[in-house]
Amino acid sequence: MFRYIAFSWQVANVDHADVARRLEEALLGRGAWHSVFETPGHRVFVTGNARGVNDAYLLPANQGVILGRLFRRGMAAPNRRGDIDITDLEAQRITHSDGRGLIEQFWGRYVAFLPSWTGQARVLRDPTGTLPCVRIQIDGVVIVLSWLEDLFKLLDFRLPSVDWDAVAAHMVLGRLSGRETLLKGVTQVLPGELAPMTTDGSTPLQLWSAAGCARRASSFDHVEAARRLRATVADCVQSWASCYQSVVLRLSGGVDSAIVLSSLVQTGATSVPVCLNYYSPGTDSDERAYARLASQRHDATLIERTVDDGFRLDEVLNVARTALPANYIGSMGTIRTDAEVAAEHGADAVFNGAGGDQLFFEVRCTWPAADYLKLRGLDQGFLGATLDSAHLGHVSFWKALRQALKDRTHRGDPLQDVIRFHTLMAQDAMVAAAAAAPRFVHPCWLAAQDLPIGKFNQLGMLMCPFEYYNHHLGEAAAERVQPLMSQPLLELCLETPTFVLTHGGRGRGLARTAFADRIPAEIVRRRSKGGMENYIATVLHRNQDFARELLMDGLLCKQGLLDRPRVEAVLAGRPGSSATFTTEIHACIATEAWLRRATAPAMPTHA
């Protein structure tokens, strides 16, 4: 499990230097940690690094260090086996541009520590934000790290107090995309942001912006756009595959994972992966027929496993102390099996197709027609875009046309309707949280009101990085790789207008066209999508007593954030409670479990 800790302090301050000394001694006293960069008043340590997977790239002349995995832009994927060395010229471009050269010349999974010409320590998080980057100050020492649990093992340090306004905002928004976290005094460096490691209140600099990419709407037709999408997906997937000797692929049977499989085997960048499909009883979750078609197409081994219907929700209480809670639904009943299958087959990582919904635009709506009208006006292509939007939104042509005329002047608002689908929060707490929510939203998203309605909503779906670490298994979990969430593909899909992404009136329309000859026709044509609704409802029903006790007697109720009578009615299955989404209950359980861990006395952990 690759992690890092970096810290900065004023050398002339004796007290600050003493704290830094104790932290450095604690790191050196643990054999797993080693120093990869040091200057007066600045140290960077790593553990779990491996050449070609996650490592430290030291810039010449001690100009900085980059942690993680880098790929050069424009280099053919088959040539990426092994790792790279940064040349003197590339290092100069990176340092002289205050980090912009790194974003422009490379991509990957990284954080970079780049001291300024004055010696000020700074950290740059890559545009995907894959590696967590948390910032905290302790007695004058600024610490930036990926895994907060490590800090509790190294210093006699108590977890900062919970920010209850942030907890309320988290419940309303689903996840915080801004710099603030749920812990007071703990912030996160945003993706694409260069942040100073100082105590003087210096302002971070946004070097890369997803909103900026979305504003660069490309003018390519769907044929050229499909060609570019296919090439970029293949490049990203094969680049990640080149880091590992062998991988396991979570093959759901949907379009995204089928595309990843086809790209993995396209040029032999890696051995044919072992594919893993999960299913459970219920009409929404058994996709084995499609997974079999995809694996047979490429002669890949397919392992079929049932999700753990006996999953006990009390397991989620064993969650890491982190700055932000993570919802467990996506990995519920599968996380241990992932690791077991990877170990059985000697795989170094588990790949998946996460991010396809957001990147390729799988949304039932009529927004693409409004986007076309705003970007290109009322020309001959507008009628085709409207017809596609009618098919996409399952409405008549005339309704799609009226909606496009209405939505063409839409001003994006990240907070619009944030309380619409919440049924368990106390009403007054929900209203107050919505009013305070701008503090917890990514500033670039707040400033993206000029974007067309479809692109604005796509941006919102891509604003929060996907989880890299497993918050429940820690080092026991298999390495997780989401190759679709790579900077070149993220940029391409943000720049591609929604009416091109949905060409033909289908969600993922462009992606289906681009890979029509690489994935089974049944998957290309597939309209349905597997889900977990039946499974998560079953787990909740079997753990209803635990859920009721956890929430009814929990901190969320005590803080007045949950409507206790409503929670009681829902978990008792009383009439009138059916409108509550099962996923909302699970989200509350995840937040409650995180709160109990965050407010509990420090103790040895699994990580």
Image: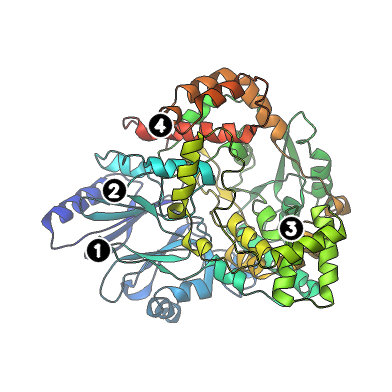
Q: Nearer the viewer, mark 4 or mark 2?
A: 4
Q: Is residue 60 above or below residue 584?
A: below
Earlier in the chain: of badge 2 and badge 3, it is 2
266 left or right, relative to 591: right
Q: Amino acid at mark 2?
A: Leu
Q: Where is mark 2, residue-wise? A: 27
Crowding around mark 4 (Cα neighbors within 10 Å: few <14, some 14 to 19, many 20+) is: few
Q: Mark 1 or 4 closer to N-term?
A: 1
Residue at (80, 33) in percent of width and height: 283
Instruction: Give the Cα separation between the discs numbered 1 and 4.
Output: 34 Å
Question: Which residue is found at the position 75% from the left and 76% from the top?
Answer: 377
Tell me where residue 336 sits by quadrant: top right
Badge 3 crowding class, 10 Å Cα cut-off, few under 14, some 14 to 19, many 20 or more, is: many
Q: Quadrant of residue 391?
A: bottom right
Which residue is under mark 1? 200
Q: What crowding class fits label 2: few (fewer than 14 Cα within 10 Å), some (14-19), or many (20 or more)?
A: many
First in sequence: mark 4 or mark 2? 2
Q: Determine contact: label 2, label 3, CB under 8 Å.
A: no
Q: In front of the other: label 1 or label 4?
A: 4
Say what amino acid the circle numbered 3 marks.
Val
Residue 432, quarter of picture: top left
Disc with the residue nearer the chain's start (1 vs 3): 1
Of 427 and 192, nearer the camera is 427
With 214 as the anchor, is 472 left or right in this view? left
Near-viewer residue (291 or 434): 434
Check disc 1 and report its element: helix, strand or loop.
Answer: loop
Q: Which residue is mark 4?
A: 559
Q: Which mark is residue 265?
A: 3
Q: Secondary structure at mark 2?
A: helix
Q: Earlier in the sequence, mark 1 or mark 2?
A: 2
The CA distance from mark 1 to mark 3 is 51 Å
